[in-house]
Image: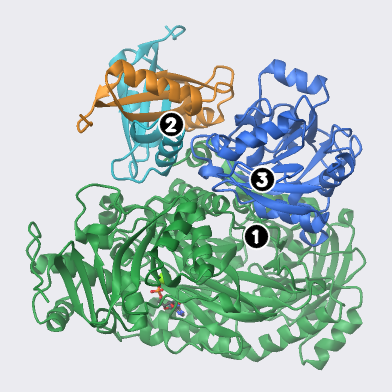
Chain colours: A green, B blue, C orange, D cyan
Amino acid sequence: MSEVLPRPGDPEITAALVREHGLTESEFERICNMLGRTPTFTELGIVSALWNEHCSYKHSRNTLRTLPTEGAAVIQGPGENAGVVAIGDGVAIAFKIESHNHPSAIEPYQGAATGVGGILRDVFTMGARPIAMLNSLRFGSLDSARNRYLFAGVVKGIGDYGNSVGVPTVAGEIVFDSAYDGNPLVNAMCVGMLREDELIRAKAEGVGNPILCVGARTGRDGIHGASFASEDLSEASEAKRPRVQVGDPFTEKLLLEASLELIRSGHIVAIQDMGAAGLTSSSAEMAARGDVGVTIDTSRVPVREAGMTPYEILLSESQERMLVVALEGHEQQVREILFKWDLTAEVIGKVIQEPVYRVTEGDRIVAEFPGSALVTECPRYDVPAEEGREAIARRSIDVAATKELAAESDPTWTLLQLLAAPTIASKRWAYQQYDSTVRTNTVIGPGGDAAVLRVRGTDRAIALKTDCNGRYVTLDPRVGGRIAVVESARNVACTGARPLAITNCLNFGNPTRPEIFFQFKEAVAGIREACIALDTPVTGGNVSFYNESPTGSVHPTPVIGMLGVIDSLEHITRSTFRNAGDVIVLLGDCTDEIGGSEYLATIHGAIGGAPPACDLDHERDLIATLLEAIRAGVVASAHDCSDGGLAIAVAECIMADPGKMFGADIDLGAWDSLSLRAVLFGEAQGRVVISSGEADRVLEIAARNGVPARVIGTVTELAEGLTIRAGGRVLKIGTEQAAAAYHEAIPRIMDAAPQSAAIEETEGVKV
Amino acid sequence: MKFGVVTFPGSNGDYDACHAAADAIGRECVYLWHKDHDLKGCDVIVLPGGFSYGDYLRPGAIARFSPIMNEVVVHAKRGAPVLAICNGFQVACEAGLLPGALLRNASLRFVSRLVTMRVENDSSMFTHEYYKGQILSVPVAHGDGRYTADPDVVARLEGEGRVAFRYSSTGGDVSDEDNINGSVNGIAGIINAAGNVLGMMPHPERAVDPVIGSTDGLGVFHSLLDGVTA
Amino acid sequence: MQLYRVPVQIIPRPGILDPQGAAVAGALRSLGFDTIADIRVGRFITVDVNAASAADATSAVRSMCEKLLANPVIEDFVLEEPTLQQGGQS
Amino acid sequence: MQLYRVPVQIIPRPGILDPQGAAVAGALRSLGFDTIADIRVGRFITVDVNAASAADATSAVRSMCEKLLANPVIEDFVLEEPTLQQGGQS
Ligand SMILES: Nc1ncnc2c1ncn2[C@@H]1O[C@H](COP(=O)(O)OP(=O)(O)O)[C@@H](O)[C@H]1O
Ligand SMILES: [Mg+2]
């Protein structure tokens, strides 16, 4: 074997250069020990890419290990490009969620678009055809032109990419909170379907097998994007703009079709997308998974620009590329499939016996690492965790003592304020930009509690939802982590689905700060408890640290992506009322809690108090009750009670579907001993609003399951409007007035202010 | 009767169109590859929705030069039916099978929702199962659906009854409010002079099954069944 | 053969509504640019083409415009002067 | 005050992927235009603006570009010479 020598023109390896690569002194020492010499510039780039937080999970791996990952349905847990679960009849679902926060903060349109592209590839490289996209978005307040620009750009980026590829975007969530000023969160989730026997893994195998680079050419896009994703957002990021990657959904669509054809063809043994840290991470990970050596020749990689160095080729994050391990002798068949789709495939390396990870430029060796050391030697850190004083202080605020505003003497006023709060208001402005019906499987699209897609050829359907309330997590990360899981579970259960498994995207600040790492550990512990209680294992996910801006850290936001299964199409249930005359039942109980509520945030500008308690046994029994009642055919509609509390939930039931509006007559006198605002707007967990033609049966099923349930009113005609009697007061509002507040709030902000709307609507334009 | 759905690179409604033909009306349906020169004996050609060639340059501009389009044009000239949906409508306009062009929505935003449209022509081979004035609920999903043509072309379309569908309220009124993309006269679909090419932005193939929300698109397929003999 | 760059302007035909131009003009006005009379948004394409002469380059690009780059129903096009580029075939 | 038209060319920055240009080049090549070396697709904007002089018109439009018309993350812009239009305010 020849020696690894610096390449002519390589910069000298200095302490400053090592620091610039985001590596600590001790990490650098580790590399030198691993190699038995000083790394070359190319090697430094490789390690820096693989050992940065985004690829290595060095601060999170030990904590993530505590999550439950096994279950009867799980075919593939964490460790692959996406998790896979069986849903019956030989059908499996692959799904995963991933963040693209930092790129979206710099260039919202391309950042969001390439985020969608990346997660799509993670799913179709498992052999699954993508059937649905979801997302979870966080922005600062829409009062700021910059935030409106980010919101508009991200939504357009998500829409344009998914629409073009032809995968429906069916659900998601959007929250506005000034905690996300300067650091929006853009999490995209993809769901794919496959037959169990079509699963393929990203594991290099078979000495002599060729490695091919497939799809788009490699340019200088996003070099060091991965380390960039692991830095705090600051002025310095502004200067990093050329790193922005541009998405090409057209090529992605071709790559999707070609990859599925390739996988089904039997000519390949493994396939992996080139995502963060591009060729480097995909090749090193595939080799490590297969426990084999690989050699890659950068001079054979098809490039877009002349004069690219091995360093650049290895670290480029050009989009829409795949790494494929083919069967030896089948290169031509692989090429033919790609040519059919107007794509190229070049052999750039092969699987070798020798346990090394080797990169050459023609004949010259430019990088070489022993075995899978690159992956296995990666440092793992257990850093100190301690709850921040600010969090404790916030939680300890006596929010029950918050003085009511004069205007609150009329609860109708409060209701209207909350209906128009952007976090609660209808997100139709955004999701009408997403094609939600392509592929004709969408039974319930955006706007319901969870999306529902039928599974063709069976009588089943799947339900999907992303959820997280970052405010709760800020106030109490363990409770907040639990609630993220149970809320997503309740949402899918409301459609008639049994919660089956989750994926998660953990968005936090800088983990080397003890108060942030405390949030992380506690939130993961909460997720763990809830997943065990509900028997919904974790099949994968993503961690995004360093979500901070000059104004501080974001709310810790562990987003849960939940998958549920509906065993018969007949059981699919919608969230809005169906028939006037139906009886309205509340499953679960009201409490005096208002801590962490949207009411406090919107009406009083306050984030404080303890978040609502989360009783996991109750949540499990609630879901069992709901599903039993739905299967018995006695539930006309079911709607989860969350942001804004019971009054908002009921208002949504009458007018969230503009094509089918009702009135409702509600009496909450049973809770007159509690504070009125807690009854109306408190966010007690474990509640679902049901409408039924056979309320007695619902009550009977609830009683048998030990779940509190009570008739709270009846569904009336649209013209009757909404009446809620509670605490000796009467809240009365016309359905259309409530609908206008709810449906027009976001369009009013985004369209009616012509300056901002126009600026944002113009492609690729910056304020 | 046999359906052929063209797959251009970037088409994504091909699958839905084929399902509509095969599942909803039980007819044979095959995919036609854009590089082929053979319509495989199909009676009805569907130019499906999607983003052929990424909608780069102008939607439909590049796809119209696909080899298969030569055969589609010959098929249309023979008077045989071509159903051009969404991106297919854009391709058909670029290829000169239909007059006019489809521009960026007036809102400058993609629009995906269920719309209501009024049946204007109830005698064509695509629409005779409907009655004039019937209100249909059908999904749209497009960013470039603003139908535009020279005033004299529009006058001819209107005068000859070749406007097939018009965006309307649920009550059948036509107003700017219901004109989801700013099309001239609220035009949602048009028919060529010979009556055998229908172009429409809404997706009838996504409205053929009660479980996904609407069956109002079935009429287009049923009309074809009754009106054309294989 | 030389390598020429031929810039092409493609603009909406008069009478064709240009909502994008209107939106941009509105946005600029509200940013304080109140001297704006009108804005039209079209496409700008640079075509690098090998040709024996500038005139040949222009005529090749003109026929590309007629065939594909512009749609005469909605757009007009204008070719700018070709400029000689480095690195043409010889 | 006079009315000037300032044409603006906006093109993807060098090194930034231009999938649209690549698709158009591919299409033209397959139509037989095999002398094409490269195509980049950007936007062409004409700004009609009232100004005291051509120089003022240019500088106003330059600041519009910086502020709104071009996205500096991925685009460069070039201003062409202003031309005097009929019908300016006096
Ligand atoms: N929050 C999490 N919960 C469970 N598994 C996780 C989580 N974050 C990451 N993982 C798993 O760790 C593995 C490594 O992720 P990786 O594939 O490197 O991320 P990327 O998607 O950026 O390539 C994946 O299998 C992923 O599912
Ligand atoms: Mg991955």
Residue shown at the point (80%, 52%) measured from the top left = A659
Between the residue at mark 1 and the residue at mark 3, the CA separation in whole angstroms equals: 43 Å
Report helix, strand or loop for mark 2. Answer: loop
Compared with B97, A411 (above or below) is below
Q: Where residue A16 appears, x then y in whole percent?
A: 11, 65
In the rendered image, which residue does mark 3 sit on? B48
Q: Taking the image as drawn, is residue A592 in sight? A: no
Q: Is residue A493 left or right of residue C44?
A: right
Q: Where residue A251 appears, x then y in whole percent?
A: 46, 51
- Tell me if the residue at label 3 has its CB under 8 Å from ligand 2: no
Amino acid at pointer 2: Gly
Between the residue at mark 3 and the residue at mark 2, the CA separation in whole angstroms equals: 27 Å
Could you tell me if the residues under marks 3 and 2 are in contact, i.e. CB atoms within 8 Å?
no
Amino acid at pointer 1: Leu
Q: Where residue A442 appears, x then y in whole percent?
A: 70, 61
**Circle 2 residues within 10 Å: few <14, some 14–19, many ≥20:** few
Marks 3 and 2 belong to one chain? no
Marks 2 and 1 belong to one chain? no
Q: Where residue A572 appears, x then y in whole percent?
A: 78, 71
Could you tell me if the residues under marks 2 and 1 are in contact, i.e. CB atoms within 8 Å?
no
In the rendered image, which residue does mark 1 sit on? A418
Report the mark closest to the observer, 2 or 1: 2
In the rendered image, which residue does mark 2 sit on? D32
Amino acid at pointer 3: Pro
**Circle 3 residues within 10 Å: few <14, some 14–19, many ≥20:** many
**Circle 1 residues within 10 Å: few <14, some 14–19, many ≥20:** many
Nearer to me, B150 or A501: B150
Q: Chain of mark 2?
A: D
